[in-house]
Image (cartoon, rainbow, N blue to C red):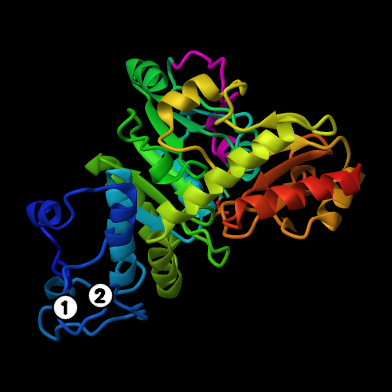
Amino acid sequence: MSEYRWLSPEEYDRRYPSQGDGTRCVHAGLPAPVPGAPFLPGPVFAAPYHLDPRHGPATAPNGYGRPDNPTRRLLEAAIGELEGGDCRVFASGQAAITGLLLAVLRAGDTVVLPADGYFPVRAFATDTLAGNDVRVLFAPTAGPYPSFEGVRLVLVETPANPGLDVVDLPALAEQVHAAGALLAVDNTTATPLGQRPLDLGADLVVASGTKAMTGHSDLLLGYVATRSAELLERVVAWRTATGAVPGAFDAWLAHRSLATLDLRLGRQTANAEALAHLLAGRADVSGLRWPGRPEDPAYPVASRQLRRMPGVLSFDLGNAERVARFLDAARLVAAATSFGGLHTTADRRAQWGDDTAPGFVRLSCGVEDTADLVADVAAALDAAA
Ligand SMILES: *Cc1c(COP(=O)(O)O)cnc(C)c1O
């Protein structure tokens, strides 16, 4: 039961026949137009809702805020449209990923996780999952992968954060399913405009919406999407039991931000391409990774699988002091973690206890003008030499 009227698939096709990425982002999850109502209804702030005194919660869509919130449902409809599945949002990417792992895995199960993926997920696996008698195997994103016999769940991150390796999802899905296991894909770096894992054979998508998807560096969000009613039910039960839901205002901000995803990614990718070109030509930069570069080891798979390249690249400046000089000198590159925001940022990952080299930098391109950004990064590298 919804308090908003939805466009039927036929109405939607009639209204938005082109279905390009920009169109899909602008209209994702919006209710049917009502004269006098806003395009995106404002956030609904509620813990309890009024109940029917006689029939209780059975007659209304909302009873209590932990399971029910109409602002959250609109956002879930939007992300679900973009991912091509049913979506549920969480308070953060970590809440979504740990929720998925704990909802699916039981004592005695085996899970395969990325050896080069998001560090806190690996730490969670070795602490909490291993403590729950789940066997944890790590595999590098680019392979080789272990045998999946006896494995319950394979979680991959592609492109992986921060190393930006990729894995061939249709080929992997075939191997995972042949062994009777489930495949989950962390789609944080690509976003659903960059890659639709459910179309490529994954059973589950999980992601942080904190990064490029919402892109304004002002909220935390996570989500799980799937086409399996059974898996969705388990995820929803977990979320309701643990209460790991985003607040109404964050959900509304996220939905508002989604409308510009196509525009933001377009500029971020263009900036990453220009910076990759600059960095590849500099003798003082090593280990450049960007999956959109034909020379990159990830390129053969990335160019087949990704609908667009991420705005993130990584490289090595040799040591922590040179990274500090580079960040001091740059006027358009803020020292900050996270990625995918409007502002260009760079993060020396080793300062967080990550297992990367001391001079390893993940640089996330914002939406500044390309020429300004390239000039600034070039000048900052000169100053750091
Ligand atoms: C940031 C990130 C997460 C965690 O998301 P939060 O929203 O920070 O909790 C998970 N996976 C990847 C790949 C990430 O980059």
- Which residue sits furthest front? 371
Q: Is residue 135 left or right of residue 101?
A: right
**How far across and down, in percent of the image, does residue 249 sit?**
43, 74
Residue that mark 1 sits on: 56
Residue 144 forms part of the magenta stretch:
yes
**How far across and down, in percent of the image, does residue 177 sit?**
34, 20
Residue occupying the point 77% across, 44% down: 353
Against 45, residue 163 (above or below) is: above
Of helix, strand and loop, which one carries label 1?
loop
Foreground residue among 247 and 325: 325
Residue 41 sits in quarter:
bottom left
The answer to whether the residues at label 1 and label 2 have Cβ atoms under 8 Å apart is yes
Q: Amino acid at mark 2?
A: Gly
Foreground residue among 274 and 37: 274
Residue that mark 2 sits on: 63
Magenta span:
129-148
Q: Amino acid at mark 1?
A: Gly
User: Which one is closest to the eye, mark 1 or mark 2?
Assistant: 2
Considering only order in the chain, which callout, 2 or 1, is on the residue closer to the N terminus? 1
Residue 226 shows in this picture: yes
Which secondary structure is most common in the magenta stretch? Answer: loop
